[in-house]
Image (cartoon, rainbow, N blue to C red):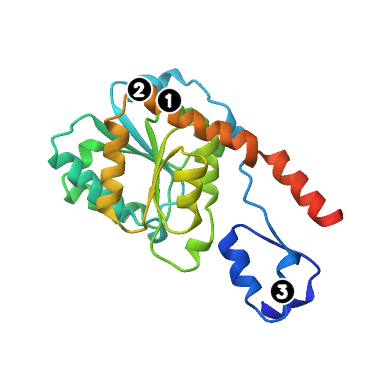
Amino acid sequence: SHWHYKKVDKLVVLSEMMKGRLAEIPGVEADKIAILPQACEKLYETDINDQALSKKFQGKFNILFAGNISPAQSFETIISAAKQLKQDGISDINWIIVGDGMSRKWLEEEVASAGLSEFFTFEGMKPVTDIPKYTPLANVLVGCLVRSDLLEATIPAKVMSYIAAGRPMVLAMDGEVQELVNKQARCGFAGPAGDSQAFYENVKKVYEMSPKEQKLMGERGRMYHFKYLERNIILNKLYNFMFA
């Protein structure tokens, strides 16, 4: 990989941290590296009203996870937070899990053994075009990752789609995603990867917000998306970097 990095004319990376790591390689010049975040699909920018789903999940504080169910997603963090919320006597929370993956069976078994089945709904694999039917129902969007030097140098595509969806988010992820969510977009709370206590406390913060506060937090994310992260903005930056 280092041989290729040194031979190419230009490099595109996803984060400042990734640029810094590549620039440390002898023979790789920092000025030939551009930082361009992943651009999410345009479909996440528009809500879809699905009356059947709205009826199914109405009257609850809905926490949505959408994506791959694998060991990298650190569902242990989610389960731990769900246990604590149950211990707090909060009974109107519904964790909606949309997706599939190698850890789905394990996750369903862990949820059942922890006595949390009444708080979880597994929707299974859905077409990506269905996700905008779920995000409008969510009070908060969540995502976790395991601790990893590699993962902390990226901003996951999931986070970009969550920002575009215009809903508050709570994340347990290391690296620049914390700066993006907490300080730049100000659209949620991002704590350390694997820190179930911080994740629980951040979910509870959003739970205790008024609907107006939740809406404003989500809207800040969507506005940030259209100002800095929208697909055509990213593509224009890529074009200018390649040909200017």
Q: Secondary structure at mark 3?
A: helix
Whether residue 109 is visible here, answered yes or no, is no
* Mark seen at residue 215: 1
Would residue 218 appear left or right of 194 to someone viewing this image?
right
Q: Residue at the location (86% across, 54% down)? A: 243
Give how far apart the Cα atoms at labels 2 and 1 are: 6 Å
Question: At label 1, which amino acid type do we have?
Answer: Lys
Q: Earlier in the sequence, mark 2 or mark 3?
A: 3
Badge 2 is on which residue?
A: 211
Q: Secondary structure at mark 2?
A: helix
Question: At label 2, which amino acid type do we have?
Answer: Pro
Question: At label 3, which amino acid type do we have?
Answer: Tyr
Q: Earlier in the sequence, mark 3 or mark 1?
A: 3
Compared with 6, 77 (above or below) is: above
* Mark seen at residue 193: none
Check whether the beta carbons of the residues at disc 2 and disc 1 lie within 8 A of each other. yes
Badge 3 is on which residue?
A: 5
Front residue (pair 123, 14): 14
Would residue 182 appear left or right of 233 to someone viewing this image?
left
Mark 1 closeness class: few <14, some 14–19, many ≥20 residues within 10 Å: some
